[in-house]
Amino acid sequence: MSPSQTPDDGADVSADGTPVVYRLADRCSLDDIEAGEYYHAEVNGVVPYGVFVDLTETVSGLVHESNLQGDYAVGDELVVELVEVRDDGDVSFAEAGVDDYDTEHVEAGPDVSVAELDEAVGETIALDGVVVQIKQTGGPTIFHLRDDTGVVPCAAFVEPGVRAYPDVEIDDVVRVIGRVETRDDAIQIEVDDLDRLEDDDAEETRADLDAALDERAEPNEVDPLVEWEAFEKLRPDLRAVAKRLRKAALNGRPIRMRHHADGDGICASVPVQLALERFVEAHHEDPEAPRHLLKRLPSKAPFYEMEDVTRDLNFALENRERHGQRLPLLLMLDNGSTEEDTPAYRNLAHYDVPIVVVDHHHPDPDAVGPLVDEHVNPYLHDEDYRITTGMMCVELARMIDPSLTDDLTHVPAVAGLADRSQADAMADFLDLAAEKGYDQSDLEDVGEALDYATHWLKYNDGRELVDDALNVNCDDRERHEDLVDFLATRAERDVERQLDAAMPHVEHERLDNDAHLYRIDVENYAHRFTYPAPGKTTGAIHDRKVEETGDPVITIGYGPDFSVLRSDGVRLDIPLMVEELTEEIDGGGVSGGGHLVVGSIKFVKGRREDVLDALVEKMADAELDAALSATSTADE
Ligand code: MN
């Protein structure tokens, strides 16, 4: 050892004047060292012009031979003074040559939570969290880390496009040390070090984080928009769904919403989409997170088609591969309760894709129940379609983000009118909408406009257009009104045009039970591939006949291999009739379903007459609704 030296003026000394030499914890970074101070170091390389030393895994530098007093070999320890950290990150030291000193330990930057990061910009911090996404970019690897308050992207760089910390996987508990930076106003951590916690440490931290996640996922307590006893039975189920959705969002799990492409389906999905967007925005530092995590997709069919599920699954697997995302949670809205959905669900069962259903179509719980994680449906609580999906989902959205309430108060009325709900609560919902300046015909127009826009949007969610038409997340009331007026007028005109063509071809007969039966061949006597489609065309004809006769009416609109059914004042059980037809007509290829009194049936073209004849026979056996001559029923 070289002779002792007096410390420079700048170096810290302890109370009795002894110089202080710092020993850095492994996780310390350049931010933890200061020029003029002394540090314990270990030689990691010897070169002709000096020695390289490590203070920690990430803090290293050169002691130039001109600043070196002794001879050192790799592994030797010595005390160095920091000369400077250059802008390019090169660090130079000088041998301190102190014999008599006190050692002090330096811990890494303070532990902070994701929510506190905006107060720590520019600082080096430590953060424990669970990895929820690992995205390899052309530059750094981005680890999305979840703690008990939110999710933050952490950029770790080795070489362009090379995976940093290749041993770390999704769901690992890690401790990251890094500098809090802002990129395009968004907070990100530049990683100095990222360690997977092991064994007891990991289990303890994971348990803490999971408990905190569970608490944060707890939905908000909201007062119901209207007093409605029947609805209260559904509230615990909706709370469970809200919690599951919030948890998924916090856990970086994408949520894919599939909804029936009609007025009620839109009134259900748009509020939930908006609530989730706000929730994700509030808990993810990455401003792109809402776009990457949330998708709303209309489904043409009244069930989850194999085509849709195959696309969804393919998209999810691609995102897992390309963006290191988890597989999504599937949220079925105003759809998804029937046996016809089960092949699609079984397809998803090969992967980790939780399924959540909120629907009011007549369910087949035995078939669907085992395949889904949550199933909210009024029929499961002895209620029925009158509680529409839009009504349920406005409450669901408020449980996710109660600040949306004012934006949504007119939506249950739109949903109810679109699905012709006869719910007792409709009067209250209409009053609520009236407070916002909507009368019933305005609300019906909104429903028509949504239906019309959705028809032409086909597979597109039509985000902004739909928001404007529904007046949710829309800041321009006048534009909303003009748009609805335009769309609803076009819709009405198109329906008129369709009925002008079709009405002369409607066939009439009186069934044994005295109900009127109307039949229309929508394939040959209605415009095709336009608005209204066969289902709505049949519905419009049916409505006219109900109005004309004031008696119980059944209407069948049929094409080569399908038929659409509407009925009023007749106690049909369409799901049961489909089941019977499937058994009775061998080789008929019968499938279908829907509500009890409104539905659709598919069959093979060559057995159409047999299926329709058998169907009519069953209808003729059905009881009439004694209490009423004509009651509107749920539109499909
Ligand atoms: Mn509906």
Image: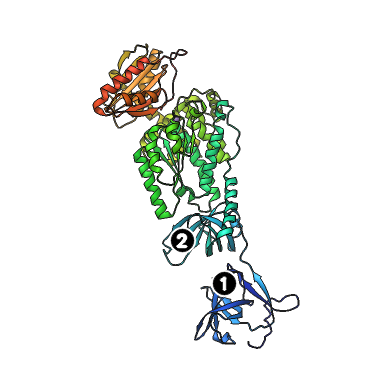
Specify whether 558 is left or right of 275. left
Q: Residue furthest bottom?
A: 3
Q: Residue furthest left?
A: 606
Circle 1: is it few (<14), some (14-19), or many (20+) Cα within 10 Å?
some
For residue 500, the mark is none
Tell me which corner region of the image, top left, top right, bottom left or bottom right, holds residue 111: bottom right
Q: Residue 32 versus residue 622: which sits nearer the camera?
A: 622
Residue nearest the observer in this picture, 227 or 306: 306
User: Does residue 369 appear in this view?
Assistant: yes
Residue 472 locus on image (x, y percent)? 50, 37
Q: Is mark 2 within 8 Å of ligand 1?
A: no
Q: Nearer the viewer, residue 486 or 151?
A: 151
Give the colouring mode of the picture: rainbow
Query: Please, is residue 288 above or below residue 72 in the view?
Result: above
- Asked if residue 479 shows in the view, the reply is no
Left or right placement of residue 521 versus residue 67 in this view:
left
Q: CA distance from mark 2 to mark 1?
A: 23 Å
The answer to which image quadrant residue 535 occupies is top left
Q: Earlier in the sequence, mark 2 or mark 1?
A: 1
Q: Where is residue 310 drawn, in percent x and y? A: 35, 43
Q: Quadrant of the N terminus?
A: bottom right
Quarter in which the C terminus is drawn: top left
Residue 56: which disc?
1
Q: Is residue 68 above or below residue 141?
A: below
Q: Residues within 10 Å of mark 2 (few under 14, many from 20)?
A: many
Closest to the observer, 554 or 545: 554
Report the residue marked by disc 2: 141
Task: Give how far across and how far down residue 197 sits, in percent.
Answer: 55, 60
Q: Which-is-in-front pick, marks 2 and 1? A: 1
* Direction from residue 451 to residue 428 in the image, left or right: right
